[in-house]
Image: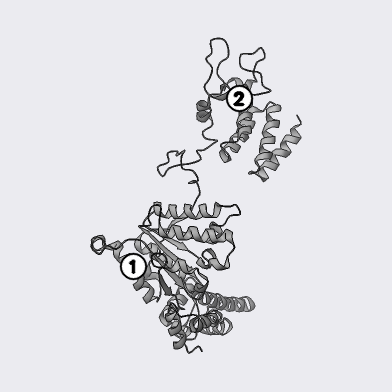
Amino acid sequence: MSDALINSLVAAVEARPDDLTLRLHLAELLVAAGRGPEAIGHAAQILAREPGHEAARQLMARALGGGAPGVPPQGSAQDPPAESAAATPAAGPAAEPAPGRAGIDWAAMEEQFGDVVPPRFARADGEPDPVRGHADRAFDVERSTVTLADVGGMTDVKKRLEVSFLGPLRNPKLRTLFGKSLRGGLLLYGPPGCGKTFLARAVAGEMGAAFISLSITDVLNMWIGSSERNLHDLFESARGHAPCVLFLDEIDALGHKRSQLQSSMRTVVNQLLTELDGVDGGNDGVFVLAATNAPWDVDSALRRPGRLDRTVLVLPPDDPARAAILEYHLRGRPVAGIDLDAVAAATEHYSGADLAHLCETAAEYAMRDSIDTGEIRMINQADMLAAAREVRPSTDAWFATARNVAMFANESGAYDDLAAYLKKRKIR
């Protein structure tokens, strides 16, 4: 067998490690070339990805001289290859047949190749768990270091969170007395860039709970039933890490109005409704926070009592919050003579993301002058005000759309807080 061909296939497998067909072909050529240990390594990699891969099992048996088709059986007149002889039981009339299919001692193989083929499933204590089904899916379970004290403004939102979840969590006796469960759902809506995700992390940090963030890309799959299974797995992970804050970002994409969806996506919304109800095991200790820029596109069933039954408008930061956000984004930068209150007053209706962009733009002004003059200068008040004139608030476009909803689609009163804010801003 040509070593050049094998070397080319080795390079191809390294470039495409998940191509099991290519890896199996390479392993077969290695067996034919008498390079059994290398073939065993590749067969092990295939079995690590697909434990039931029959062709890989047979090839490993051939590499070990286990009596598979095309290989002389143990105890025959033809001796097995040298590399296989050390790994197989002794042949001869007195030798007892090894357990397992085709005379292979699979227990011995597992011990010998345990470092090559890791266990597919594992419990939290590190012990292998062979019956977990699809529980080997990985979710990013975080521990947030941000608390509500780090969130500027949002007084109404903080009060709602305190009453619905944080207060009962800190007072278990009162929770028992009043029959308050540790389950709940809160829908945050408002213009983009106003801190909805940051707030969700702060809630998890405030209660010392696990934090899991979900986006539509974590759920949707092209295969029928896989999206629903992914969604169920995620909720199961949150229940297993309770107390846990489960953050559903862009909920309008995952829980869109079913009347406007195709049948394949309707089943995903149905699964989400089932998981929010906690039919299988309950959602005690799981607090669901959802965020959207378009609450009017969210299916009404998601917002009924017992699911995402509380809705809070997350508005652009007020003057003190804007000053705090500006100070945060200027930390670590060379600044001099900046009046944060004056800049905050000049940036009304700016979102937190807008303010971060403003600080970046002001830094570009100072850096550009430093490059032109050859002398480093600080970021000053003039840079900040010039950046405020260049960077316009991104929330205006959102409020233009929200205005129509608040005026013409608010029969239920769900957007009364939005209508009051628009009236205060005198947006007609």
Query: Which colour style is shown?
Result: one colour
- Quadrant in which residue 321 is drawn: bottom left
Note whether 1 is above or below 180 in the view shown.
Answer: above
Q: Nearer the viewer, residue 144 or 22?
A: 22
The residue carrying mark 2 is 64
Residue at disc 2, secondary structure? loop
Sequence order check, earlier mark of 2 and 1: 2
Residue at disc 1, secondary structure? helix
- Amino acid tagged 1: Ser
Q: Which mark is residue 164?
A: 1
- Amino acid tagged 2: Leu
Image coords of residue 14 (percent x, y):
66, 43
Local crowd size for mark 2, using a 10 Å CA cut-off: few (<14), some (14–19), many (≥20): many
Q: Residue at x 66, y 23 (%)?
A: 69
The span from disc 2 to disc 1 (Cα, nearest Å) is: 63 Å
Outermost residue, top direction?
93
Image coords of residue 263 (percent x, y):
58, 60
Image coords of residue 227 (percent x, y):
54, 55
Local crowd size for mark 1, using a 10 Å CA cut-off: few (<14), some (14–19), many (≥20): some
Picture quarter with the N terminus = top right
Note whether 352 is above or below 236 in the view shown.
Answer: below
- Quadrant in which residue 41 is drawn: top right
Q: Which mark is residue 141?
A: none
Note whether 31 is above or below 142 in the view shown.
Answer: above
In the image, taking residue 390 as reference, residue 172 lies left or right, namely left
Q: Nearer the viewer, mark 2 or mark 1?
A: 1
Note whether 12 is above or below 3 in the view shown.
Answer: below
Q: Are marks 2 and 1 in contact (CB under 8 Å)?
A: no
Image coords of residue 12 (percent x, y):
70, 42
Residue 339 visible from this viewpoint: no
Q: Residue at x 64, y 33 (%)?
A: 55
Residue 129 visible from this viewpoint: yes
